[in-house]
Image (cartoon, rainbow, N blue to C red):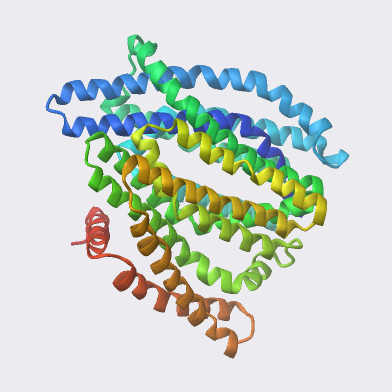
Amino acid sequence: MALGQNDFGLYGLVGGLTAFISFFNGVLAGANARFYAFSVGAAKAAKDKSAALEECRRWFNTALSVHTIVPFILVAIGYPIGIYAVYNWLTIPVDRLGACVWVFRFVCLSCFIGMVNVPFSAMYTAKQYIAELTIYSVVTSTLNVLMMYYMVTHPNDWLVRYAAWMCFISIMPQIVICIRAIIIFPECKINLSYMWDRTRLKRLGSFSGWQMLGVLCGMLRGQGMTIVVNKFFGAAMNAAQSIGNTVLGHCNSLASAMHGAFVPVITQSCGAGDFHRMNDFVIRTCKFNVILSAIFIVPLALELPEVMRLWLKTPPAFTVGLCYCAMAFYFVDACTVGHSVAVNAVGKIAKYQVVVNLVSILTLPLAIISGLLYRNVYLVMGMAIFVAGMVSIVRLYFARMLAGTSIRRWVKEVFLMPSVAVLIGLVVGYLPHVIVDASFLRVCMTALFVEIIFLPIVWFIVLTTSERAFVKEKAGKIFRHFGFR
């Protein structure tokens, strides 16, 4: 509402140009997290704790050396390319070119700081300090709400100011995380003699090299789809696409936090040689991702047109449909995300990366062909959903081959049982539509009806006895942390 649909679409489009930084950042961050967590798991099983601590410290310093050099190189190469793209390649109104250049600069700065901070934030994840990271997320989200309210109540040309604010709110938590990591983690002790360990640099480079293929394909698929939509349908459709991604991002925030907590556990279990425990957590990761997202997405799917009206008053055309496409894509991808983590934990990723990314990259040519032949944005997004299904099948196969995960167990516990719970939730949640006209009251009633039936089904039928015990244990720790017994 504050930016307007064109500026909102331009922000998403221009921000996507920093994918060249996010690309390398994702590669190196994933590799760092894997080696951190693996060494932490090995340390727990090791007899010599001091040697194990020193091993993890060496990995930290190796990562720190990489993350102090690569960002400078990326910005030096990518910045002029991005500026050229803004002026000569993308479909941007002439009167918004100057503003878009400043948007690009602010997004570059936030990406740069984020990349330098990766070795510190990755240690938080490896050590499972998820609660503290969640606090930072809650604080920044609250400040964002206040800022957005101010923008709406004080109309102005907000595009550049919005980019500056998003840069600031991204950088500040990174600085706090860096300082805190140095203070609380003995592994984060800087040692110059450890920074240029050739053996570890080689291992990190080898693992990162194969992961690079995956991140590149993910970048091409995500940002490439944004550019395809821009070329065929214009900036207004990018606005609808960005709204869909924003809505989905909020809906799966709880699932993403839980996923972030499971990833180091899977890798640590692999490092300790406990493959039975690792495979249990692979299934839990997939199942909890689907369930926690469904808690928000199922009632939202039933009331999406009314929510869009209440939120945006007059949303851009196709916004509701693209939100549904984003939800479908997420569910297809989320149901096998744990299997991808398992393959990375094992470390034998060469064949997996080649196959899964050859399949993944099919999204772009299929989307382009669909756009050229039919000029239908839903068909273009449908190609992404179809390819995501093929990628999930590849993940299942390789996780079974490399980590011994059971496909039959996945079908039963992750696909069939949650699907039944979602279907029942949709049926029951539709009942208010029969008796109440569209309104905020009906949105609340729909959410209430869905959760009243969905949550008990999940608890008593979808979750196993061990998973219920796991949830009770984690919930108990949270309550005890806040002084409840």
* Residue 84 shown left or right of residue 309 in the figure: right
The quadrant in which residue 73 appears is top right
Asked if residue 404 shows in the view, the reply is yes
Q: Where residue 68 sits: x, y (%)?
A: 49, 19
Numbered marks: total: 0
Report the residue at 34% width, 47% height from top: 262
* Residue 164 shown left or right of residue 415 in the figure: right
Q: Which quadrant, please, contains the C terminus?
A: bottom left
Q: Is residue 438 shown above or below 311?
A: below
Report the residue at 72% width, 33% height from top: 102
Q: Is residue 451 shown above or below 217?
A: below
Q: Residue furthest bottom?
A: 435
* Residue 384 shown left or right of residue 31 in the figure: right
Q: Residue furthest right?
A: 94
Foreground of the two, 406 or 288? 406
Q: Is residue 63 shown above or below 123?
A: above
Report the residue at 22% width, 24% height from top: 53
Q: Residue furthest top?
A: 193
Q: Is residue 133 shown above or below 244?
A: above
Q: Residue furthest left?
A: 47
Foreground of the two, 176 or 58? 58
Q: Which quadrant, please, contains the N terminus?
A: bottom right
Foreground of the two, 172 or 115? 115
Report the residue at 47% width, 53% height from top: 334
Asked if residue 3 shows in the view, the reply is no
Q: Where residue 256 sits: x, y (%)?
A: 44, 51
Q: Where residue 150 sits: x, y (%)?
A: 64, 54
